[in-house]
Image: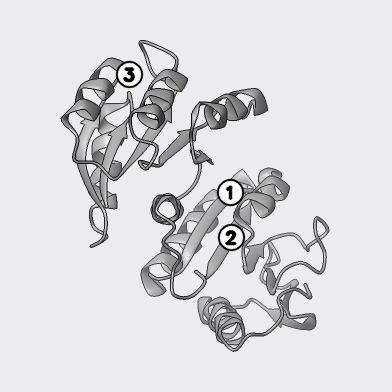
Amino acid sequence: MRILFVEFHRAFRQAASWLLEQRSDLKVVAQAGSVAEGREKMAEGGIDAAIVDIPLPDEGAAEIVRELHEANPSIPVLVMTAIEDREVHERMLGAGANEVLDQRNTLEEIAAAVRRLEGEEPEQEEMRVLVAYEESYLAYRLAITNAIRALRPHVVVGTIDVRALEAALERMDPHVVTCNRQNTVDAGSRAGWLTLAPEPEEASEVCLFGRRRELYNPGLEDLLGVIDEVEELIRSGRELGGC
């Protein structure tokens, strides 16, 4: 898929473009830092989809979204933004965007959203894991997140401050959550939930499809085991939920 990437922040745009191109089916063939530059790249043709990251410096981003849509309705547009205003999202969709994606998503989630633009569905559902801790446990959160990404590279891993847990659950809909709090937000909706106690001598809890067991000072292998077991059960057609 040939992509036009319109994003004001040049370093981020270039880095994200490079990372997207590590997927064999995605290629960023044109980059732009403004609406005006995006128009020029659009006129050159040769694109299958567009990513527009808002806001942009010169004009309302809705203009380029609308122009892309009107010039060729077959070219889908993904809008990325950190703006949480519902009216802004609705304005982008009204201008012709196919999807508005939260800028806090991982590159794996962005790549999946780009593929959705062409109606390409993955052969199997992507395994999604969310790692949530308070900022005081930031080092723990990042270490665990990076380890899962390295050891299970096919898994989509999100990481957030636990204060944003409810919104992240709704947005990402993870199969497995590892958190230093029990699930009081959407109890019964997750396939797996690992509650890691802040202190090693305190009991942690693994919930797997409603089955609960205590662990003391669990290791990374325990977390990976939960991920692997949930993935295997999902592949077998098991109903989700329980934790």
Mark found first going from the N terminus, 1 or 3: 3
- Colour approach in the figure: one colour
Question: Quick one: 39 or 135, which is closer to the camera?
Answer: 39
Specify the label residue 35 is tagged with. 3
- What is the C-alpha distance between the residues marked 2 and 1? 8 Å
The quadrant where residue 239 appears: bottom right
Task: Give the crowd class for mark 1: few <14, some 14-19, many >=20 residues within 10 Å.
Answer: some
Task: Give the crowd class for mark 3: few <14, some 14-19, many >=20 residues within 10 Å.
Answer: many
Specify the label residue 182 is tagged with. none
Specify the label residue 130 is tagged with. 2
Q: Is residue 226 left or right of residue 75?
A: right
Mark 1 lies on residue: 160
Question: Quick one: 125 or 66, which is closer to the camera?
Answer: 66
Helix, strand or loop at mark 1: strand
Considering the image in quadrants, where does the C terminus appear? bottom right
- What is the C-alpha distance between the residues marked 2 and 3? 34 Å
Q: Which marked residue is nearer to the observer: mark 1 or mark 3? A: 3
Looking at the image, is 161 positioned above or below residue 172?
above
Residue shown at 56%/86% (left/top)? 232
Residue 175 is situated, as x and y percent measured from the top left of the image, at 62, 69
Helix, strand or loop at mark 3: helix
Mark found first going from the N terminus, 2 or 1: 2
Label 2 amino acid? Leu
